[in-house]
């Protein structure tokens, strides 16, 4: 068998099949031995802030999608958590259905200074919830990794970016998603509100939130600041 090409190819095929089975079947089973956190348990303070910000920025769209909150403060809090969880589930479905995971990974690897670009290396416990089943490791990185995207940009930035990406990122290969809106980026539909909520959820569970890249002010900004100091 080992003296023929077909035998070698057979052994190699079985070997790689075994690797694929372990990495795609055995490892996920071991990762998810514990009961995953339900979506209601994923609504945290950081995400609630973003969700309430959506309600403030787009009141008509928010009301059309979710109705009006109860008058009682205690009931209002529970209502917002419920609607936020509802948006998360729909946002995840839209993210998967639109194929966003083809171009964006959601896994920070301990190589190539990825921590400096996108935040801490991903940990197993971050994937122990219903929104990470299955984990969307991504097939390639046409766009940036989104594991730590939540809170790094405002809701209105995401609205414009989904509506027409090139308005914010020149030559962006990302397609437009006008069906997330009712004609303009300042009128997100229920789907638009949901996918923005989902993106703002990514990384919202971290103690250090949001995760930004190392920031250095532009030279012209530094000059302006120095001029202002001299004048004073």
Image (cartoon, grey):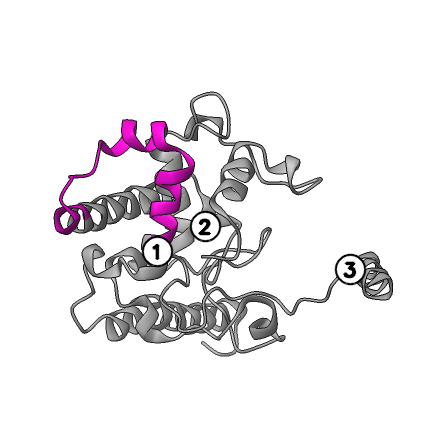
Does residue 207 appear left or right of residue 113 in this picture? left
At a point 58% along the width and 51% down the height, the residue shown is 143
Q: In the rendered view, tell whether residue 7 sits above or below residue 145.
A: below
Picture coordinates of residue 5, whole percent (x, y): 54, 69
**Extreme top residue here?**
183
**Residue 102 part of the magenta-drawn span:** no
What is the quadrant of residue 124 in the picture?
A: bottom left
Q: Residues within 10 Å of mark 1 (few under 14, many from 20)?
A: many
Q: Which residue is mark 2?
A: 101
Q: Secondary structure at mark 3?
A: loop
Mark sitting on residue 142? none
At a point 19% along the width and 51% down the height, the residue shown is 77
Of the numbered discs 3 and 1, the one sitting upstream in the chain is 1
> Which residues are the magenta region?
49-76
Picture coordinates of residue 83, whole percent (x, y): 23, 43
Q: Secondary structure at mark 2?
A: helix
**Could you say which is closer to the camera, residue 25 or residue 96?**
96
Q: Which residue is mark 3?
A: 218
Does residue 171 appear left or right of residue 39 in this picture? right
Which corner quadrant holds the C terminus? bottom right
Q: CA distance from mark 1 to mark 2?
A: 21 Å
**Could you say which is closer to the camera, residue 177 or residue 139?**
177
Depth check, mark 3 against mark 2: the one in front is 3
Mark sitting on residue 47? 1
Does residue 168 appear left or right of residue 156 in this picture? right
Q: Residues within 10 Å of mark 2 (few under 14, many from 20)?
A: many
**Could you say which is closer to the camera, residue 93 or residue 24?**
93
Q: In the rendered view, tell whether residue 178 sits above or below residue 216.
A: above
Residue 97 seen anywhere in this rendered image of the structure: no
Q: What is the magenta segment's predominant secondary structure?
A: helix
Picture coordinates of residue 25, whole percent (x, y): 29, 67
């Amino acid at each position: 068998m080992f003296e023929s090409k077909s035998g070698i190819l057979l052994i190699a095929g079985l070997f790689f099949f075994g690797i694929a089975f372990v990495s795609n079947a055995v490892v996920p089973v071991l990762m998810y031995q514990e009961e995953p956190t339900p979506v209601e348990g994923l609504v945290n303070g950081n995400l609630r802030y973003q969700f309430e910000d959506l309600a403030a920025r787009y009141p008509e769209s928010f009301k059309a999608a979710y109705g009006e909150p109860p008058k009682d403060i205690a009931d209002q809090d529970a209502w917002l958590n419920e609607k936020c969880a509802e948006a998360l589930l729909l946002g995840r479905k839209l993210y998967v259905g639109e194929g966003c995971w083809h171009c964006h990974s959601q896994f920070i690897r301990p190589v190539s200074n990825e921590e400096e670009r996108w935040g801490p290396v991903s940990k197993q416990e971050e994937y122990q919830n219903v929104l990470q089943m299955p984990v969307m490791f991504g097939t390639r990185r046409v766009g940036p990794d989104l594991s730590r995207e939540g809170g790094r940009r405002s809701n209105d930035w995401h609205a414009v970016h989904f509506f027409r990406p090139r308005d914010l990122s020149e030559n962006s290969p990302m397609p437009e998603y006008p069906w997330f809106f009712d004609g303009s980026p300042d009128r997100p539909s229920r789907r638009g509100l949901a996918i923005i909520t989902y993106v703002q959820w990514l990384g919202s569970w971290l103690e250090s939130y949001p995760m930004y890249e190392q920031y250095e002010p532009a030279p012209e900004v530094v000059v302006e600041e120095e001029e202002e100091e001299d004048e004073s």
